[in-house]
Amino acid sequence: MDIPEGVIVAMLTPFDEEGRVSEVEVRRFVDFLINKGVDGLFPVASCGEYTHMDMAERKFLIDVVVDEAQGRVPIIPGSGATCYHKSIEMANYAKEKGCEAVVLHGPYFFQNAQEVVEGHLRKVAESVDIPIFLYNIPFFANEITPKMAEKLCEMPNVVGIKDSSGNMVNVMNLLEMTRKIDPDFRVLVGAEEIMLPALMMGGKGCMTATAGIMPEFMVGVYENFKNQNIQNAYNLQFAILSLIREMKSVNFPQGFKEALDLRGIKVGPPKMNYPESSLNKISDLKTRLELEMKNLLDKYFTGIPLKYRADKQFTQKYSYPAPEPGKVGEKKYPDCLVCGMCDGDVECKVAPCENMPDNIDTSKRVETEKLSDDINEDQLKEIISNTIKKVLENN
């Protein structure tokens, strides 16, 4: 099994003016990164705002990246979700598309007990036939502790971990605890600031957003380290720190997106509704970023332009996916315990699923009304009004 390592890009996602994934700009981004010598691509990433996309859009993004890469580098998509059903679905899709591995973080939104988090990860790993990189990102999802990683790395398809804690103590414990179980287990960092320290202690690379914005520096750190040019690696690692701080100084991941836009990849408008004061701050930041990024390239990579100039045209190849429809009463996942717990993928009847445990209270469930394809505005308002009335009556 050839497991990716080195500089793997946690990809930001370019969107168009309507907030849809921009196929043309994704293709341009893939071409830019491969030409810069990165070792792998991680689409459907947290920094790529995958939580703003439905399942069809996530799969669409994988399709575009795989098609543009044409096997030149490994593709390792994210498979994160609130429940294991969706992670299994995404991992199976990645396998079908020929991806080399997937990235799997703990469930998010609900704060789960450690044994539940481990159970989630184990269930996915047992259910799919593709290598898995665990993903510890405690800022946004339930933590994957070094102890969990130690136990999970006994599973044959759990091959590595991306640790985005930014905590070198965590990285050291991961390195020490997993190597006793699997000497080939890959520990990659998600915090750009500690790439070189992690490499020096046995880490195998990074999965970072900065690798997609200033790949020259992250690839430079990695290649110089491998070639034992430690001073050069040291200089590049320190040189990039100020820029990373600047990109993190505004609402994540907008600072990174502004920097990528400066490289010639159109990322589109923000997905969040920023007040004018925040937009002014972001505009000021972009001015500073442009100056700092130009100075960094001029000093360390003389002759490399800030904006990427591709030598080919990029065009749209695929039709944009329609939202995945659900059928009233249909259970998308056979072992679902309660209908209507699928993030809107299916609609739900008042009657419980056949597998629903006895202790689930359904007295306050509201029956959904099936919407026809040709519903008019007045009918929609009436349905909404009736639904609100039912909710109030049940409460």
Image (cartoon, helix red, strand yellow):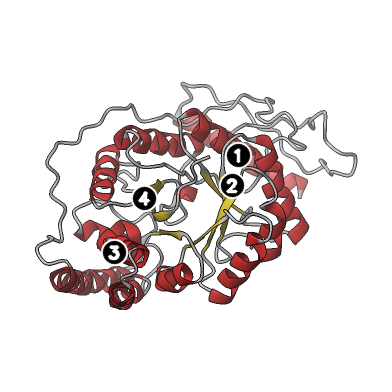
| Residue position marked by numbered label 4 in the rendering | 39
- CA–CA distance between discs 1 and 4? 27 Å
- CA–CA distance between discs 3 and 4? 12 Å
| Residue position marked by numbered label 2 in the rendering | 81
- Local crowd at mark 1 within 10 Å, few (<14), some, or many (≥20)? some
| Residue position marked by numbered label 3 in the rendering | 220
Q: Is residue 60 above or below residue 158?
A: above
In the drawing, what numbered circle is on residue 86? Answer: 1
Which of the two marks, 4 or 2, is nearer to us in this view? 4
- Rendering quarter of residue 275: bottom left
Q: Residue at x 79, y 31 (%)?
A: 353
Q: Residue at x 28, y 77 (%)?
A: 235
Label 2 sits on what residue type? Ala
- Rendering quarter of residue 63: top left
Label 4 sits on what residue type? Asp
- CA–CA distance between discs 2 and 1? 6 Å
Q: Is residue 288 left or right of residue 4?
A: left
Determine the secondary structure under disc 3: helix
State if disc 2 and disc 4 touch (CB < 8 Å). Answer: no
- CA–CA distance between discs 2 and 3? 33 Å
Image location of residue 38, percent across then percent down: 32, 52
State if disc 1 and disc 2 touch (CB < 8 Å). Answer: yes
2 or 3: tag closer to the N-terminus: 2
Which of the two marks, 2 or 3, is nearer to us in this view? 3
